[in-house]
Image: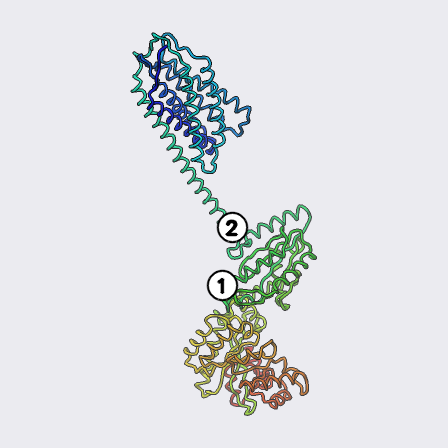
Amino acid sequence: MLNPHYDSSLVIISLLVAILASYTALDMAGRINTTTRSAARWWLLGGSIAMGIGIWSMHFVGMLAFRLPIALGYDTGITLLSLLIAIAVSWFALWRVTQAELPFNRLVKGAFIMGFGIASMHYVGMAAMRMQPAISYDPALFAASLLIAIMASGAALWIAFSLRNNVYRVTLSRMQAAIIMGIAIVGMHYTGMAAAEFPLGSICMAAKSGSSPDTLAIMIVLGTVAVLIIALLTSVFDSRLELRTAVLAKSLANANHELLQQALHDNLTKLPNRTLLEDRVEQAIRKATREDGSFVLMFMDLDGFKAINDSLGHHMGDMLLVQTAERLKAVLRAQDTVARIGGDEFVLLLEAGTPEDAAIIAEKLIAGINKPFLLETHELRVTSSIGITVYPQDGATYHELAINADAAMYHTKRGGRNGYHFFEASMNINAHSQLELMQDLRSALERGEFYLLYQPKFDTRSGNMVGAEALLRWRHPIRGIVGPDQFIPLAEKSGLIIAIGEWVLYESCRQMRVWYDLGHTDWKIAVNLSPLQFSHENLVIVVADTLAAWQLPAKCLTLEVTESTAMHNVKASLAILHNIADLGVDISIDDFGTGYSSLLYLKRLPASELKIDRGFINTLLEGSDDAAIVSAIIALGHTLNLRIVAEGVETESQHEFLKKLGCDSLQGYLLGRPMPADQLETAARGQLPSNSQVTRSAAG
């Protein structure tokens, strides 16, 4: 027998090629499993070629490392056949490990098929030497090589299947597995080589026509390494591209989700907005129609929210709305919907609700909102007004239900707030009228439909006129004279009261300038401030600018603030009142006695005047409870160095009693009704016209 030996450097290279081929195979299995169906076909084909070339290259380099004391060569056709067998075996292996499952029986079958395929590649490659006489094989070693090939194939299939998905530290795991697989493949190869026996006198028939072993070794190693590296780089780049695509797709999905959330939800409270609410109401209508059922729609807004928002800032108002939303969600069931449709307005949809259910939930909502809100350092209280409609009796569409629920809510507001009402047909008429009046109110200032009347004030002791209170009136082109009780609440709700109030202040100061120039330098013009106007951030600037515009001394202006407004937020009110007082403007606390003033705060208010509410004056009789209250107010005011004004004086007995108690100034129909500015000048000269004349003049 010929005595063979091996080139150790080529043996090492064959092992490295086997490991690289194994790693490439594992990576390709992962790529095929994670790509789309169409892309997987191409990866399967490319992976089979790269893996087949790698395994075949390891086998052929191992053969080139084999040395005999005769010239060796390899038949090109048979060598290419062995390469095709390697590619086919690789295709089968990659196809098998990318299946959804790999049970034990399939693993065993696959191991046998792949093992015999690799062995076939090896022994066909050996046949490419075309030895004469033919190579004989040791049966035991031949069987061992087949067994090693089958076991190595089984291990390779199982490892590739296990690592085909991304696992923890996948690169390190694949590297370790590739080393094991490479050693197994090399072990099979060299066992098969050891089984080969070459009799003395053997001749390699392919030695003359084939390439030299050294040249082939260099070409095959370089070509194979290039193919494997290109395959790996392609896989890596594609993997990164796919990862970036996945990240981009996820970002796009998140962006779409975010846009959908923004389109269908309120940004502040995260509650459904009007669009999503309308969709859910439409669904509820379809469901109720199919099942002959019903549902409830509630409109709710917060009483006193505007004052908080304007006095403490929008940040505090936003916090209040967020906490309100949480309280509403806590009351409702999972199948119900609460939405914010703007400002402090919320809408609640109660599925399969009855009027009885609605009443119970409305009471829970009111109780929940009535609890104090703790916002930073502030403890705030608001109430809620609720209007309720029931489908289908109160409306067949969302639009009809919404209009009627809104009408019921405003009926609650007009009835005193902090409660709820179910819709009734009569409310719609009132709601329509209120809507028209609101629209007309928006243009009334521009059209010059507002005007002022002036009710005189008289000094109790001397009987001389000491000024007047400016009273706003609206001459509607169709409705005629609209009373303040009708349009002032609408102006407050819409925020128009700010612009209207500034006009009243401007016009009052203009008229006071006229009287001042006529010699009435001791008069004062009193102007009422609404709660919204009082809490507006530009109030002090507006007052200062108005006085400057007419060059009117600040002592000629008195601003009247109701007791409840001044006490709503004492800390903020004190700051505003002090800023006004610093201008030199007098401050009058209006409707005194109707609120819940603390004497401690009253002492700190920079007020110069207390105005007793007309409710105490109307039933003023000596010895009555009202008389005792009025007497106490006058005594308290004088103790605090405040002037006391009584409004609503209509009888001589009231006049005398107030004079007796020491009231400083009087105002009322007995002394003078509200009148135009020119008539007030006449009244100041002691020529007060009759009530009928005043009424006709004011109406005209």
Residue with the most extreme right position: 356
Neighbour class for label 1 at 10 Å: few (<14), some, many (≥20)? few
- The picture places residue 206, in percent across and down from the top left corner, at 33, 12
| Label annotation for residue 235 | none
Query: What residue did someone put label 2 on?
Result: 261
Residue at 36% across, 18% down: 63
Instruction: Compare residues 34 and 454 and report the one nearer the observer.
Output: 34
Instruction: Compare residues 50 and 672 and report the one nearer the observer.
Output: 50
Q: Is residue 536 left or right of residue 387?
A: left
- The picture places residue 113, in percent across and down from the top left corner, at 49, 20
Q: Is residue 353 in sight in this rendering?
A: yes
Determine whether the residue tagged by mark 2 lies in a helix, strand or loop.
helix
Say which amino acid is labelled 2: Gln
- The picture places residue 11, in percent across and down from the top left corner, at 36, 23
Neighbour class for label 2 at 10 Å: few (<14), some, many (≥20)? some
Q: Nearer the viewer, mark 2 or mark 1?
A: 1
Q: Is residue 331 above or below residue 601?
A: above
Q: Is residue 39 in sight in this rendering?
A: no
Q: Is residue 80 left or right of residue 611?
A: left
- The picture places residue 83, in percent across and down from the top left corner, at 39, 19
Residue with the most extreme bottom position: 462
Q: CA distance from mark 2 to mark 1?
A: 23 Å
Instruction: Compare residues 594 and 452 and report the one nearer the observer.
Output: 594
Q: Is residue 106 above or below residue 345?
A: above
For marks 2 and 1 on the same chain, the one whose residue lies earlier in the sequence:
2
Query: How many badges with numbers are in the image?
Result: 2
Q: Quadrant of the C terminus?
A: bottom right
Say which amino acid is labelled 1: His
Query: What residue did someone put label 1 on?
Result: 315
Q: Quadrant of the N terminus?
A: top left
Determine whether the residue tagged by mark 1 lies in a helix, strand or loop.
helix
Q: Is residue 156 left or right of residue 381?
A: left
